[in-house]
Image (cartoon, grey):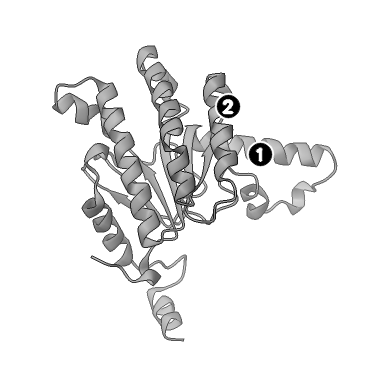
Amino acid sequence: MTLPLANLPRHVAIIMDGNGRWAKKRLLPRYAGHTAGTETVRKVVQFCTEIGIECLTLFAFSSENWRRPEREVGMLMDLFLNALQREANRLHKNNVQLRIIGERSAFPQKLQDKIQQVEELTASNTGLKLRVAANYGGRWDLVQAFQKLALQAQAGLLNPQNMTANSLAEHLALNDLPEPDLFIRTGGERRISNFLLWQLAYTELYFTEVLWPDFDRENFQLALQDFASRQRRFGRTGDQVEQNKTC
């Protein structure tokens, strides 16, 4: 299946859900599911690069995930570090620009240093813009943006009466990317779970029962086909959208 370039979303955001259940079904420890999930990440990044999707944002670790068992959290930190060490050169070779969004100060220093190293390595790459949300939450994102605006107002650099939606958006974690066109959540849950609360305002939502380690090219293509079939109106009528297509 090949989609016309005009029908591809520019920016896809994904909640990668179902690693633990994938492992449980196979009588494996949860860590095995997370490890299998990293292989799916590699395949999805490669697929996005091949078909020309500009931006991909993956929800890897939420600000609420610290509530999980300490052992699991520690293993996830190790897995994150190992994935960065293993994939850095591959991403750079494939012209992928990687940035981590979220409050990284809570991570072990070794992981923080590796994040900075890989971001610097890939900073000038002009291909797929890959963002990984780690220790991220949509509410945190909004609060930190409000704090920056408040500091500007306090310093006399911003009149609160002149503040607009764009003023806030400029301080959000994905301020350098277009808002997501397509949101995908694997694993069967049908909620956005504090992910990109501001940025998903007009995003097309797609939910699938497929667990993340099983999410392959065919599953991704089904999501893209569904996206291509939708009419995106952004407040306009359907007739207006069709009329604009013919102009």
- Name the side, left or right, on which 186 lies relative to 158: left
Q: Which residue is mark 1?
A: 146
Please tell me whether mark 2 sits on a helix, a strand or a loop. Answer: helix
Residue 126: horizontal and vertical position, in percent? Answer: 54, 56
Q: Which mark is residue 235?
A: none
Please tell me whether mark 1 sits on a helix, a strand or a loop. Answer: helix
User: Which badge, 2 or 1, is on the more N-terminal residue?
Assistant: 2
Between the residue at mark 2 and the residue at mark 1, the CA separation in whole angstroms equals 27 Å
* Image vertical order of residue 165 relative to residue 147, above or below: below
Q: Quadrant of residue 172?
A: top right
Tell me, yes or no, if residue 54 can be seen here: yes
Quadrant of the image containing the N terminus = bottom left
What residue sits 46% from the left and 48% below the top? 93
Residue 108: horizontal and vertical position, in percent? Answer: 53, 19
Query: Mark 2 is on which residue type?
Result: Asp
**Nearest the eye: 32 or 71:** 32
Residue 239: horizontal and vertical position, in percent? Answer: 39, 79
What residue sits 64% from the left and 47% below the top? 168
Q: Which mark is residue 113?
A: 2
* Image vertical order of residue 9 relative to residue 91, above or below: below
Identify the residue at the far bottom of this view.
247
- Name the side, left or right, on which 109 lies relative to 146: left
Identify the residue at the far top of this view.
70
* Image vertical order of residue 115 relative to residue 27, above or below: below
- Name the side, left or right, on which 123 lies relative to 202: right
